[in-house]
Amino acid sequence: SLMQLVDTATFSKLFVPKSLIRHTVVTIDNLPNAKMPYKHLVLYPAKGSFLVAPTEQDLFLIDPRNQQRYLPYMQLLETIDLEKLIDIYASYYPLFQQAYKDLGYPDKQFHDRFVFVIEHLLETPNPDVVLKLKQPKVLYVFANDEFESLSAGQKMLLRMGAEQRKTTLEILETTAVLLRNID
């Protein structure tokens, strides 16, 4: 069904095809958490290295060239028919619900979690400035403690450029409306 909305080349390049529904549920369920289980994501990670530019002593800026890494995902978001995607989700909902139960939530509804997660992501700060990072160990972290304390999903949105983040948040808002209208 998803292949009706996404061409084969894009699907092969972006989506982890194995256990698609289960990985979708795991990905969505973990976005508000501090960490993501990267081996169970529904999408492949962006290609290339995360780029930074040195600035003040021991601080770095997120390099705007990182936006190129996210272009295939942005093109997918901007071109996919959200209404048809939500229709597919609704028609396969029993499988999503079963995957959610299998994760250890036998008495909860995945749909409620999905709406909650989107609303959570919509609370992501949307600063217009390039964000500063520090590197206390191997990985970079946000220099701003408020940003560093955000969820994994919100930090993913912050690592995008401001324009990509704005577009993504607009699409998430539309998705939330569509999800709330499912019978």
Image (spheres, rainbow, N blue to C red):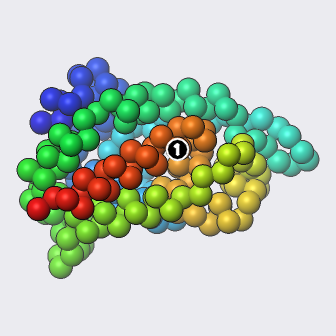
Q: Nearer the viewer, residue 114 or 134?
A: 114
Q: Nearer the viewer, residue 46 or 161?
A: 161
Q: Is residue 65 above or below residue 57?
A: above
Q: Residue at x 38, y 50 (%)?
A: 172
Q: Quadrant of the C terminus?
A: bottom left
Q: Quadrant of the N terminus?
A: top left
Instruction: Judge the density around disc 1: few (<14), some (14-19), many (≥20) Cα neighbours within 10 Å.
Output: some
Which residue position holds label 1? 166
> Residue 176, image x and y in percent?
32, 56
> Residue 162, image x and y in percent?
60, 41
Q: Is residue 117 left or right of residue 67?
A: left
Q: Is residue 101 above or below residue 74?
A: below
Q: Residue at x 68, y 54 (%)?
A: 141
Place residue 94 in its image quadrant. Answer: bottom left
**Which residue in the rendered view is the most extreme toward the bottom?**
107
> Residue 142, image x and y in percent?
70, 55
Q: Is residue 39 visible to the viewer in this orientation of the structure?
A: no
Place residue 113 in its image quadrant. Answer: bottom left
